[in-house]
């Protein structure tokens, strides 16, 4: 994971091929940011986290929303999903950012094959 949510760092989860070390996908943990996957060596758009920017974040605060991942994630073989906890949103003062602020202070389920939040 990364840190710095209180400073406006947007959290992300990265997936790499264990054999080659090549990046497979990246999924931002704040609603509104585009995820990416690598197909045939090319970076391609892989859907916006939460579908669209600004649904649960006021104004442009989703651009610097925080929600960095906490510690490492886990894999659940029964569901076939990755789980990651996310930290606080930014700015720290909640009176400055009303709303649900997806996907901060949450536990995310991510499909390891696609990198999409489920």
Image (cartoon, rainbow, N blue to C red):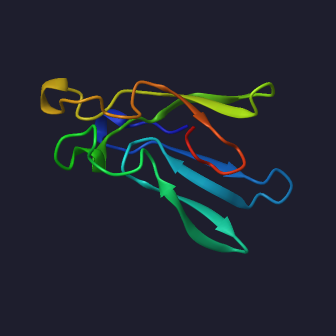
Instruction: Tell whether 114 sits left or right of 61.
Output: right
- The residue that appears at 46% across and 41% down in the rendered structure is 29
Residue 37 horizontal/vertical position (percent): 62, 61
Q: Quadrant of residue 101?
A: top left
Task: Name the residue located 18 percent from the left edge and 41 percent from the top edge.
Answer: 58
Q: Position of residue 114 (x, y in %)?
A: 66, 51
| Position of the N terminus by quadrant | top right
For the point 74% across and 61% down, the residue is 22
Closer to the camera in the image, 17 or 54:
54
Above/below status of 20 relative to 15: below
Q: Nearer the viewer, residue 10 or 102?
A: 102
Q: Looking at this rendering, what residue extends furthest in the right direction?
A: 19
Q: Position of residue 36 (x, y in %)?
A: 55, 60
In the image, is 74 to the left or to the right of 116?
right
The x, y position of residue 107, in whole percent, is 52, 25
Q: Against 83, is 58 above or below?
A: below
Residue in view at x 72 percent, y 52 percent:
16
């Amino acid at each position: 994971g990364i840190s710095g949510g209180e400073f406006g760092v947007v959290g992300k989860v990265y997936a790499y091929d264990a054999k080659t070390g090549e990046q497979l996908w990246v999924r931002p943990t704040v609603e509104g940011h585009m995820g990416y996957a690598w197909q045939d060596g090319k970076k391609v758009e892989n859907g916006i986290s939460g579908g669209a920017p600004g649904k649960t974040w006021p104004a442009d605060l989703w651009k610097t929303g925080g929600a960095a991942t906490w510690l490492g994630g886990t894999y659940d073989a029964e569901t076939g999903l990755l789980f990651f906890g996310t930290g606080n949103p930014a700015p720290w003062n909640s009176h400055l950012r009303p709303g649900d602020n997806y996907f901060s202070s949450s536990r995310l389920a991510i499909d390891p094959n696609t990198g999409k939040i489920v």
